[in-house]
Amino acid sequence: MSPDDNDSNIDNDSNVDNSVNVENNSNVEKKVINSEEVAKARLAEKRREMKEKKEREAELERQRLVIINKSYSLYLLNWKFKLF
């Protein structure tokens, strides 16, 4: 083996190392992108769940107010008949 052969082996080794580093970096980037996508999806799901919860609560409040209104109307109707 000549000294030139050693130099070319070192160059080949550094090329292999560089390609491994590039692959590792791309894997890290993919994980970061994947994690970011997962985080965004989780946030969207949380927002959707909170929106649905607020809609349910609003519907329950509307129903409660309808019942109160009907009760009050019946009370007034009953009170009116008692006066006469």
Image (cartoon, grey):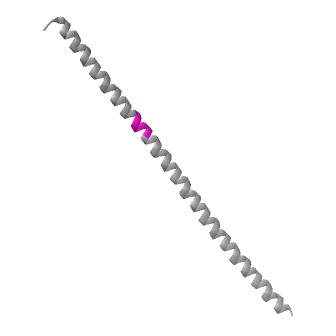
**Left or right: where does residue 24 sit relative to residue 60?**
left
Where residue 53 sits: x, y (%)?
A: 57, 62
Near-viewer residue (43 or 12): 12
Q: Choose top left, top right, bottom left or bottom right for residue 77.
A: bottom right
**Left or right: where does residue 14 sit relative to residue 40?**
left
Q: Choose top left, top right, bottom left or bottom right for residue 52.
A: bottom right
Where residue 8 sits: x, y (%)?
A: 23, 12
Which secondary structure is most common in the magenta stretch? helix
Image quarter in which the N terminus is found = top left
Query: Does residue 38 belong to the magenta stretch?
Result: no
Q: How many marks?
A: 0
Outermost residue, right direction? 84
Q: Is residue 75 above or below residue 5?
A: below
**Rendered residue at 25%/17% (across/down):** 12
Where residue 58 sits: x, y (%)?
A: 64, 65
For the magenta stretch, what is the residue range? 29-33
**Rendered residue at 42%/37% (across/down):** 32
**Left or right: where does residue 49 sit relative to residue 71?**
left
Query: Does residue 30 belong to the magenta stretch?
Result: yes
